[in-house]
Amino acid sequence: MQRIVILTGAGLSAESGLGTFRDKGGLWTKYDLEDVATPQGFAANPVLVHEFYNARRENCLQASPNPAHAALARLQAAMPGQVTLVTQNVDDLLERAGAGDVIHMHGQLMRALCAACGHRWDAPRVMQPHAPCPACARAATRPDIVWFGEFPYQMDRIDQALARADLFVAIGTSGNVYPAAGFVQEAALAGARTLELNLDASANAGLFDETRLGPASRIVPGWVEDILSATARP
Ligand code: OAD
């Protein structure tokens, strides 16, 4: 039995029309991440932060999964219990392509979080600054997004999966943001083979055993077919 851990980044959803962060024209070339992706930015200007995530949520609602999302869902269904899907993406395109149990380590656009009591609920399409929490009624509603300076979600589960992985695959991520950028080393130390699938080689491309370059919509389905035909071989 082969255990596969897959880490995805913004490049997976780029061809669905969702912007990446650090590419030419990416979100962090238009916005200062300190303003919209830190607790300090939210405290200073919650209206701006809500506007930013409301626009991204709307963009996500208008988008559809691409063949790369569909291929990963197909792989997960074909290898039950063997594929751990970890994403830095806050969109729900993997789920809409049919994937289940996706670990959203940086949170989800479609969820709301109360900064006062920690309650979570489905986000409305447009989140209002100072909206009351449905559990504690405090005006502390925020997007359920992990901001810089906060701890990514489900790290214990991710570390366990990396420790048992036979193959680690990073897809469409620039390798700039930790802890995700360190998963390749963690998996390699545990004995896994490592593969990068990306449009451009990432900051830590040299750490991977193999790199395949190209758009996700082409190279991810190609890789999934390789795996499925190898596992089907007698
Ligand atoms: P980046 O914007 O840093 O990197 C996007 C990666 O996707 C790059 O390596 C591109 O080469 C690649 N790419 C672009 N188009 C592609 C395509 N069509 N097919 C395949 N690859 C493509 O995005 P991430 O690495 O995901 O965190 O960024 C990591 C984190 O930084 C995000 O989760 C976000 C951001 O700040 C938070 O907001 C907490």
Image: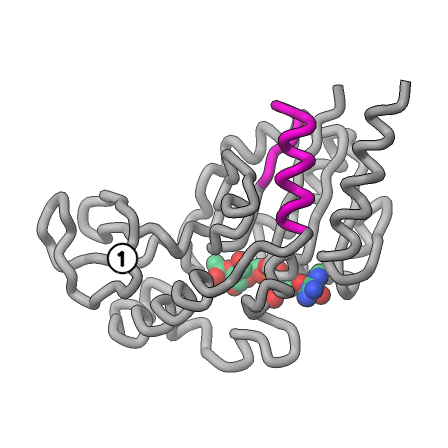
Residue at 52%, 54% in the rendered image = 89
Is 84 a magenta residue? yes
Number of labels in the image equals: 1
Residue at 81%, 40% in the rendered image = 225
Q: Secondary structure at mark 1?
A: loop
Against 175, is 43 above or below?
Answer: below
Outermost residue to the right: 234
The answer to whether any part of residue 204 appears in the image is: no
Q: Position of residue 38 (x, y in %)?
A: 38, 65
Q: Position of residue 217 (x, y in %)?
A: 72, 57
Foreground pick, 105 / 100: 100
Quadrant containing the N terminus in the rendered view: top right
Residue 143 figure quarter: bottom left
Outermost residue to the left: 137
Classify the position of ligand 1 by quadrant: top left, top right, bottom left or bottom right.
bottom right
Which residue is tagged 1? 124
Magenta part of the chain: 68-85
Quadrant containing the C terminus in the rendered view: top right
Residue at 82%, 54% in the rendered image = 206
Foreground pick, 126 / 140: 126
Mark 1, residues whose alpha carbon is within 10 Å: few (<14), some, or many (≥20)?
Answer: few
Q: Is residue 77 left or right of residue 191?
A: left
Q: Is residue 68 left or right of residue 233?
A: left
Is 164 a magenta residue? no
Residue at 29%, 54% in the rendered image = 123
